[in-house]
Amino acid sequence: MAENGAMPTLPKKCGPYISCVTSHGMNLVIRGIVLFFIGVFLALVLNLLQIQRNVTLFPPDVITSIFSSAWWVPPCCGTASAVIGLLYPCMDRHLGEPHKFKREWSSVMRCVAVFVGINHASAKVDFANNIQLSLTLAALSIGLWWTFDRSRSGFGLGVGIAFLATLVSQFLVYNGVYQYTSPDFLYVRSWLPCIFFAGGITMGNIGRQLAMYECKVIAEKSHED
């Protein structure tokens, strides 16, 4: 009788959704897909801000057609976001330093809002010169890291991401794929690394939060079993 009474609770403990999420390989795929679409969405929004301000210039037909020569921008940003978002929690595990600072979705959403604000400032706010703009954005980007991350691994990965992304941008501009108005730092704008750094920290926070959800589900399932 006791066994029969326990039967209805089994689907709640071991449903197909929980079994799917607790599979590490499947979880990586799910997290990668979520991060990809978040990166695509942010790329569309932020790139629109830059184009409206004439910070970046694509060929004239780019904005009028989704099948134009700039179709590659959102997928590339989405792929980079997925890689960064998966890399941050992987690095935390490798270093044995689990990131526990402000681990809640409300903090992650605020981080995203600050990142969008930093990008918006780079496109909309007028500064006396590029040096003043670059120093301001650098301070804001470091402030974003200090407010929402504060980990050595996060800072190191952010710097590495900013360096590599700036090199890729310089390569694309040099080959005429697109261009910046008033470039002042080897074909690009001097504040660009600050944007990449803040973007890396933001996507890293999202990736860490998604990875922490996986750990919680696994722990709950193990406790129930």
Image (cartoon, helix red, strand yellow):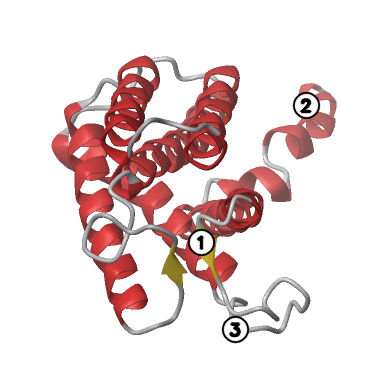
> For the residue marked with disc 3, what is the amino acid?
Ser
Q: Earlier in the sequence, mark 1 or mark 2?
A: 2
Q: Which of marks 3 and 1 is in front?
A: 1
Taking the view exactly as shown, the residue that stands out farthest to the front is: 128
N-terminal-most mark, 3 or 2: 2
Residue type at tag 2? Ala
Kindly identify the residue that appears in the image at 57 percent across and 52 percent down. Answer: 50
- Residue closest to the eye, 156 or 181: 181
Residue drawn at 29 percent across, 47 percent down: 193
| Horizontal side of residue 151 vs 95, given as left or right | right
Foreground residue, 105 or 173?
173
Give residue 11's quadrant in the image. Answer: top right
Q: Are marks 1 and 2 in contact (CB under 8 Å)?
A: no
Alpha-carbon span between mark 1 and mark 2: 63 Å
Say which mark, if any, is on residue 69. 3
Instruction: Identify residue for label 2.
Output: 6
Is 221 situated left or right of 211 in this image? Answer: right
Give the residue type at disc 1. Answer: Thr
Badge 3 crowding class, 10 Å Cα cut-off, few under 14, some 14 to 19, many 20 or more, is: some
- Measure the alpha-carbon separation of dots 3 and 2: 60 Å
Residues at circles 3 and 1 in contact by the CB criterion of under 8 Å: no
Vertical arrangement, residue 128 with respect to residue 82, above or below? above
> Percent x, y for residue 222?
49, 31
Please give the residue where the numbered disc 1 appears in the rendered image.
56
Q: Nearer the viewer, residue 120 or 149?
A: 120
**In the rendered view, does 156 fall on the left or right side of 39?**
left
Q: Which residue is drawn at 60% across and 18% down?
A: 106
In terms of secondary structure, where does tag 2 sit?
A: helix
Above or below, 117 against 64 in this view is above
Residue 102 in the image: x percent, y percent?
43, 15
Of the 4 image quadrants, the one containing the C terminus is top right
Marks 3 and 1, how far apart at CA:
14 Å
